[in-house]
């Protein structure tokens, strides 16, 4: 019965779809990064191991569990490109957007960050930074040229 049901659903769906969306951001210093995509979601901060020394060794702290929160205070689109096509019954679309975002990162529980985190505020509860972001949306489907 399940096989019959699945076959019926597939026969009724004339188009096959596959799509992805990926956004990757970084500040100019590379001390704050974030990603939102179909493959990965994280916020990454830089910990200066010896903050009083110039050129201190660093360590990346990556939050994939949702402990950190990034709030976009403002966003400006710098460029946007897109294209689509239909060839040999296969359609494709790609859209790329580059934005400049003013972002504030906090801990969801309101606690303070380690004092060695690059760019933290005086009260150690926020990191405010300007980030360059690239978002790519792509999609595939069946199509017929007219």
Image (cartoon, rainbow, N blue to C red):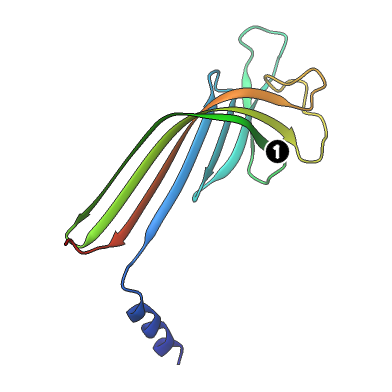
Q: Which residue is pictured at 57% across the width and 35% down the height?
A: 34
Q: Which residue is pictured at 76% across the width and 40% down the height?
A: 108
Task: Give above or below for 82 relative to 133.
Answer: below
**x and y percentages locating residue 65 in the rendered image:** 67, 46
- Label 1 belongs to which residue? 68
Q: Secondary structure at mark 1?
A: strand
**x and y percentages locating residue 67 in the rendered image:** 72, 42
Q: Name the image quarter holding residue 113.
A: top right
For this view, does 129 lie left or right of residue 89? right
Q: Which residue is pictured at 26% across the width and 57% down the height?
A: 91
Q: Name the image quarter holding residue 109.
A: top right
Q: Nearer the viewer, residue 56 or 30?
A: 30
Outermost residue to the front: 146
**x and y percentages locating residue 7 in the rendered image:** 37, 84
Q: Which residue is pictured at 31% across the width and 73% down the height?
A: 14
Task: Give above or below for 119 relative to 88.
Answer: above
- The N terminus lies in which quarter of the figure? bottom left
For this view, does 35 lie left or right of residue 113? left
For this view, does 137 lie left or right of residue 114? left
Label tally: 1
Q: Name the image quarter holding residue 51.
A: top right
For this view, does 120 lie left or right of residue 90? right
Outermost residue to the bottom: 1
- The C terminus lies in which quarter of the figure? bottom left
Task: Give above or below for 142 relative to 2.
Answer: above
Q: Nearer the viewer, residue 58 or 62?
A: 62
**x and y percentages locating residue 78 in the rendered image:** 44, 27
Q: Residues within 10 Å of mark 1 (few under 14, many from 20)?
A: some
């Amino acid at each position: 019965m399940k096989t019959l049901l699945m076959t019926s659903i597939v026969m009724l769906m004339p188009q096959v779809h596959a799509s992805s969306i990926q956004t990757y951001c970084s500040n100019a210093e590379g001390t704050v990064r974030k990603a939102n995509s179909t493959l990965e979601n994280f916020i990454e901060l830089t910990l200066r191991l010896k903050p009083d020394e110039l050129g201190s060794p660093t360590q990346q702290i990556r939050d994939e569990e949702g402990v950190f929160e990034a709030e976009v205070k403002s966003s400006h689109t710098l460029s946007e490109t897109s294209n689509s096509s239909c060839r040999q019954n296969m359609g494709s679309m790609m859209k790329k957007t580059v934005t400049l975002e003013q972002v504030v990162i906090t801990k969801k529980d309101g606690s303070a960050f380690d004092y060695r985190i690059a760019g933290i505020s005086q009260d150690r509860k926020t990191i405010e930074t300007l980030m360059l972001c690239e978002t790519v949306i792509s999609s595939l489907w069946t199509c017929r040229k007219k």
